[in-house]
Image: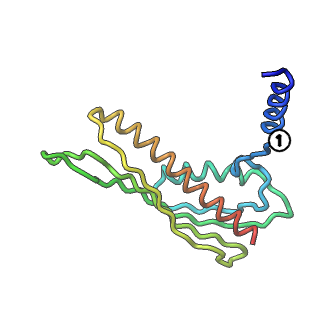
Amino acid sequence: MSKELKRYISLFFIITLTSCSYKPIFSEKNYNFEINEILFTGDKYVNKIIESKFNLIKEEQSKNKKKYNISIRTNKEKLIVSKDSKGDPLKFDLVVSAYYEISNNGKILLNKRIQKNSIYNNEIDKFKLEQSEKIILDNLSKKISETIISSIINLDDN
């Protein structure tokens, strides 16, 4: 390859990589809404994870933002998907569901139900099983909170 061609290729990659302005949605700090109050019922652990995501939004307060109240009811369920010949569980399904209601000035704007699940294998080591369940529960709860935040953003766009 000639030196000129190498320069053009290098320049092309530099321009391509630096011109990308990708930003994740949930890392953005400038939301057009504010959360007044969040009311949680249901599974305490799931609620704690969801609340930690919303605390990042609650900290930013401004006078020009729309203010929403949110009511969230969560439920966690562990189901046996399959068993071996002895009747011992081989696979589990962890289902996390949330019913949420978004209101503004006493008027209900949106009420929706979200359900996320994950199927995983049983472990002989119960400590390892408990740790993997905790990780799965964390991930499912974070996905639910991101879905709720997305629906608020979509409400605000309309």
Residue 102, above or below 40: below
Choose top left, top right, bottom left or bottom right for residue 8.
top right
- Front position in the image: 21 or 76: 21
User: Which residue is farthest left?
Assistant: 86
Q: Looking at numbered disc 1 in the image, what kind of residue is underneath it?
A: Ser
The image quadrant where one finds the N terminus is top right
Where does residue 108 sit, x and y in percent of width and height?
64, 77
Query: Which residue appears at 79% of the width and 61% of the height?
Result: 32
Q: Is residue 104 left or right of residue 97?
A: right
Residue 73 % position (x, y): 51, 64
Label 1 packing within 10 angstroms: few (<14), some (14-19), many (20+)? few
Q: Secondary structure at mark 1?
A: loop
Q: Could you tell whether 2 is left or right of 152 in the image?
A: right
Task: State the scheme by which the image is colored.
Answer: rainbow
Residue name at image x 44 percent, y 60 percent: 75
Tally of marks:
1
Q: Residue at x 82, y 21 (%)?
A: 2
Rendered image quadrant of residue 7: top right
Rendering coords of residue 53 (x, y %): 63, 50
- Answer above or below: position of 63 versus 15: below
| The residue positioned farthest toward the bottom in the image shown | 107
Name the residue: 37% across, 39% down. Answer: 130
Indicate the position of residue 12 as horizontal and vertical percent values.
82, 35
Location of the C terminus (image quadrant): bottom right
Q: Which residue is mark 1?
A: 19
Relative to the observer, which residue lies in front, 39 or 86? 86
Of residues 125 and 52, which is closer to you in this image?
Answer: 125
